[in-house]
Amino acid sequence: MAATIGIVFTNKAIFDDPDFKLMQTAFASFHFVCTGLTLYVVSRPSVGAFVPKRAGLVEMLPLALSMCLNVVLPNLSLAFSTVTVYQLCRVLLTPMTAVINYVFFSATIPRSAALVLVPVCAGVGITSYYDTKPAADAAVQTTSTIGIFFALSGVCASAAYTVLIGAYHKKLQMSSSQLLFNQAPIASAMLLFCIPVMDRIPVLENVPLSRWLMILMSGGFASLINISQFFIVNSSGPVTSTVVGHLKTISIVAIGWTISGRGVTDMSAIGVLMTVGGIIGYD
């Protein structure tokens, strides 16, 4: 949980630097390299976290492309939004996945669960609306309109990626770790070709050492998240995993709210309470 919280605020600090705000494809490619190396290490017989299984390059391209969008778009959202709005919009992944499953696979969820998702969506909308309004105090952080666009685009990309992962599980009979081990190198290579076109590369000699250390920290957090997933799956039940997920969401939102400079009487607080309460009620 600490790694997940750490990577959000570390990435936010990196993206707040104008030199790195538009370095999203290079940053994502670096993270995929960290992920691939981590999975390689833990798949070795001496560790034995999982047994690697290879899939064809062409067969994995759609999933790798979806993986790229699943990372780059949310990162752009984090770069142009407050942490609170970024994290609350990530909660929309649940209703969006439900919609995609219903439209394309006719899969339904219980009526009670669907009704609980209504305040979730309404809460995100309220918080986003008030977060984009100009603040009277210059110290209060706000979200730009393009940040909302990237946030919603990221949710759509993540929902599509989640559904695609499920399809690949059935098609290739692979675990999540085996799929990720195949995706990460392909996704990293794909993004390398995009860097000259899409990224605004800073003058590397002018980047302070502290910024490079933060980038290494972010990569380290990404590796820790991948490693921790094995322990969560192997040693925790569904209730524990759900509680940990809620604690992460609440912690990130609470810390993000604190550093944004907003008070408890701010109208967007109503949206935060609606969203968090709704997602807890859903599970």
Image (cartoon, grey):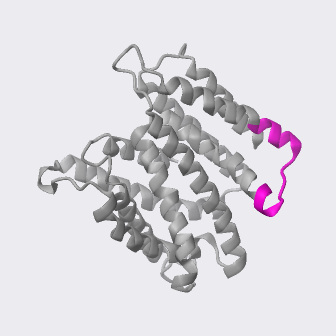
Q: Is residue 113 magenta?
A: yes
Q: Residue furthest left?
A: 205
Q: In this view of the protein, can residue 105 be seen by the observer?
A: yes
Rendering coords of residue 141 (x, y %): 40, 26
User: Which is the main secondary structure of the residues drawn in magenta?
Assistant: helix
Q: Residue furthest front?
A: 197
Residue under the point 58% across and 35% down: 250
Q: Is residue 116 magenta?
A: yes
Residue under the point 37% across and 15% down: 137
Q: Is residue 113 left or right of residue 206?
A: right
Residue under the point 46% across and 20% down: 262
Q: Residue furthest right?
A: 111
Q: Is residue 187 left or right of residue 51?
A: left
Closer to the camera, 70 or 172?
70
Q: Is residue 131 left or right of residue 245?
A: left
Rendering coords of residue 45 (x, y %): 50, 83
Rendering coords of residue 102 (x, y %): 79, 56
Stretch of the chain drawn in magenta: 102-117
Rendering coords of residue 58 (x, y %): 53, 83
Q: Name the image quarter holding the C terminus.
A: top right
